[in-house]
């Protein structure tokens, strides 16, 4: 490692965990075109440029429509393997040492792709990532909230034979009109089966969505959670109970959850004592991976190496690693901060 003399280097080299990453959202235009050709799927776009031009979104639904269209090229185990492996190589290049990735099985099973095809491909790449890149990982199976409870329960049943590979059950897709309470029974069953739980809440939905995710779904952490800041009582609860928030700055900008980077609430969250973390959500669609998310916030909010250090610490504290694994990484990060923060200009 070169001497670390800039905040950019500090961000690059500090070990990080990523906790909010949809594997389908890492499908870069180049790989999308390659897999489409391999599987003889006709696309509305013929070039990388045309695809990139289409990635302009007014809100979450606008993005989801394109995201599900992109995922349609994924048909075989090798497609899910290639997708996951491409992400892991990128993650490795940005010094992500642990990642907890979402996959949306219903996006694929609804199209006739078997659950096992999807998870076998993802899992095989994650094993290779551990062996060859030293990246540890967890899988979070996410339920599509725009679909009904019956579909969610069926998906949970399909997950049971793969229990050893799946750490947590999550909730994503179109938030408004699909509150956490719609999936109370699904999450109760997931808990009874021994899964951890997380949920997207407070991205577009108001603070009530976050409260429901905490009180009814009993989540270990909230994905996004931006709008929890609109409710003082909820903020107090989140801080007192140290419920982590997985924040995705570039996603928030692209989906117009936040108007401009300078108005992003990340620093405010840290100052309130929230366990906020920085993540990339759907990096192929939002213009950057974890380090670009850190850099955008650093520039806009004047973050210091101490903030970056805190965010990196939070990412391990909020992870589903064992306490022993967390302690190992926290020691590494503490040392990294001690040795490097004084040299940054
Ligand atoms: N699925 C993929 N990305 C998502 C996001 N940011 N919000 C909700 N569902 C998603
Ligand atoms: Zn997300």
Image: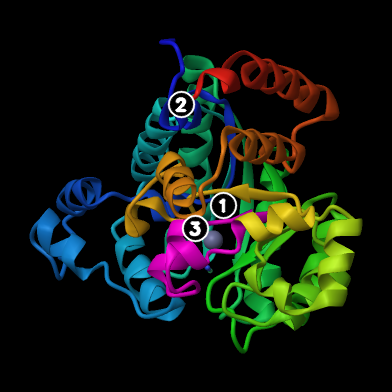
User: The residue tagged with tag 1: helix, strand or loop?
Assistant: strand
Give the spatial CA distance, label 2 vs label 1: 37 Å
Q: Residue at x 32, y 71 (%)?
A: 66
* Badge 2 or badge 3: first in the primary sequence: 3
**Residue 249 numbered tag:** 3
Q: In the rendered image, which residue does mark 2 sit on?
A: 345
**Residue 256 numbered tag:** none
Q: In the rendered image, which residue does mark 1 sit on?
A: 102
CA neighbours of label 3 inside 10 A, class few (<14), some (14 to 19), many (20+): many
14 in magenta: no
For ligand 2, the image quadrant comes to: bottom right
Give the spatial CA distance, label 2 vs label 3: 25 Å
Q: Residue at x 56, y 38 (%)?
A: 304
Q: Is residue 213 left or right of residue 127?
A: right
**Segment tinted magenta in the rendering:** 245-266
Residue 306, position in %: x, y?
64, 34
Residue 265, position in %: x, y?
60, 63
């Amino acid at each position: 490692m070169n001497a670390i003399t800039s905040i950019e280097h500090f961000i690059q080299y500090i070990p990080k965990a990523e906790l909010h990453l949809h594997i389908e959202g890492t499908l870069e235009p180049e790989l999308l075109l390659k897999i489409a050709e391999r599987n003889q799927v006709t696309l509305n776009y013929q070039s990388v440029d045309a695809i990139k031009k289409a990635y302009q979104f007014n809100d979450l639904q606008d993005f989801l429509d394109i995201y599900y269209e992109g995922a349609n090229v994924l048909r075989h185990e090798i497609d899910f393997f290639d997708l996951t492996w491409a992400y892991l190589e990128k993650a490795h290049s940005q010094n992500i040492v642990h990642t907890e990735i979402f996959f949306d099985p219903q996006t694929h099973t609804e199209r006739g792709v078997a659950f096992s095809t999807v998870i076998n491909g993802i899992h095989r790449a994650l094993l290779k990532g551990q062996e060859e890149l030293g990246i540890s990982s967890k899988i979070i199976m996410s339920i599509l909230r725009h679909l009904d409870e019956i579909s969610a329960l069926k998906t949970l049943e399909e997950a049971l034979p793969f229990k050893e590979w799946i750490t947590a059950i999550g909730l994503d897709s179109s938030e408004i009109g699909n509150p956490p309470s719609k999936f109370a029974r699904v999450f109760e069953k997931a808990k009874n089966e021994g899964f951890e739980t997380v949920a997207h809440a407070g991205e577009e939905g108001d603070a009530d969505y976050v409260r429901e995710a905490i009180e009814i779904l009993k989540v270990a952490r909230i994905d996004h959670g931006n709008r929890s800041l609109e409710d003082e009582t909820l903020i107090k609860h989140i801080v007192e109970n140290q419920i982590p928030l997985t924040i995705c700055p570039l996603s928030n900008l692209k989906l117009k959850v936040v108007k401009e980077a300078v108005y992003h609430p990340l620093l405010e969250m840290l100052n309130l004592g929230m366990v906020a973390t920085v993540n990339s959500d759907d990096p192929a669609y939002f213009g950057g991976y974890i380090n670009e998310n850190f850099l955008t916030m650093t520039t806009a909010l004047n973050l210091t190496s101490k903030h970056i250090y805190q965010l990196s610490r939070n990412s391990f504290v909020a992870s589903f690693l064992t306490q022993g694994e967390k302690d190992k990484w926290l020691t590494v990060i503490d040392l990294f901060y001690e040795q490097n923060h004084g040299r940054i200009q």
